[in-house]
């Protein structure tokens, strides 16, 4: 006998994820309970769908049309936006992250501290920017024209400071690692 003998298929148009789902159950009663829950969910959705104003319905329709060629759901786009918005709220400025890094490492060597002190002013295009918004291309543009030895020293400093920021949840990924 199969481990999961009862299967329920949810077509994409009624699945909450927007794509076909399969659910497996050991007992018939569990499968029937799940089916009943889905019926109630769909029934409630029909009732609650009238809560949208005509303007909201029009906006949703336009959003679906814009998303169609990208094969992505509206919920996925909203989740992505919310994640970016939350990351931006946690983020701090480029200079602020350097200050935080220096303050958190009181036993830092004098040479490293000096190197950090000279790194920040040489990257003026990143000043005032949230670290979560800085891209590898922007870092490259700021370092254009630097000698290889200076560039490598600054990249080492950036890698250390951005890694510190990732560990402290100030940015999701070190832009230097994307280069």
Image (cartoon, grey):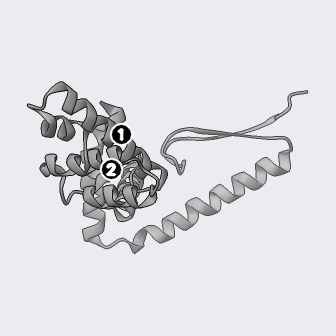
Q: Residue furthest front?
A: 110
The image quadrant where one finds the N terminus is top right
The one nearer the camera, 71 or 6, is 71
Local packing at callout 2 (Cα closer than 10 Å; few below 14, some 14-19, many 20+) is some
Q: Secondary structure at mark 1?
A: helix
- Give coordinates of residue 128: x percent, y percent: 19, 60
Left-right relation of 168 to 141: right
Cα–Cα span, label 1 and label 2: 15 Å
Q: Within the image, what quadrant is residue 159 found in?
A: top left
Q: The residue tagged with tag 2: helix, strand or loop?
A: helix
- The quadrant holding residue 96 is bottom left
The residue at which mark 1 appears reads as 159
Quadrant of the rendering where the C terminus is positioned: top left
Whether residue 155 is situated above or below residue 16 in the rendered picture? above
- Decide which of 66, 44 is in the foreground and name it: 66
Residue 41 in the figure: left or right of residue 96: right
Of marks 1 and 2, the one in the foreground: 2
What x and y, as percent, mark residue 49? 43, 67
Q: Which mark is residue 113?
A: 2
Circles 1 and 2: CB atoms closer than 8 Å: no
Query: Callout 1: few (<14), some (14-19), or many (20+) C-alpha neighbours within 10 Å?
Result: some
- In the rendered image, residue 71, in percent from the top left (x then y), is placed at 35, 37
Q: Which residue is painted at 41% across and 74% down in the image?
A: 51
The foreground one among 69 and 58 is 69
Rendered view: 56 above or below 133: below
Callout count: 2
């Amino acid at each position: 006998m199969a481990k999961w003998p009862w299967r329920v298929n949810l077509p994409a148009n009624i699945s909450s994820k927007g794509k076909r789902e399969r659910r497996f159950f050991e007992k018939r009663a569990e499968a029937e309970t799940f089916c009943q829950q889905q019926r109630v969910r769909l029934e409630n959705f029909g009732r609650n769908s009238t809560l949208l104003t005509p303007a909201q319905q029009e906006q949703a329709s336009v959003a679906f049309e814009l998303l169609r060629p990208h094969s992505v759901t509206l919920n996925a786009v909203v989740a992505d936006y919310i994640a970016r918005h939350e990351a931006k709220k946690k983020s701090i400025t480029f200079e602020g992250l350097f200050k935080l890094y220096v303050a958190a490492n009181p036993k830092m060597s004098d040479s490293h501290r000096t190197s950090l002190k000279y790194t920040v002013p040489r990257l003026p295009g990143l000043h005032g920017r949230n670290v979560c918004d800085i891209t590898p291309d922007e870092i490259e543009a700021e370092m254009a024209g630097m000698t290889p030895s200076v560039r490598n020293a600054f990249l080492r400093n950036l890698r250390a400071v951005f890694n510190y920021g990732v560990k402290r949840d100030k940015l999701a990924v070190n832009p230097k690692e994307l280069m």
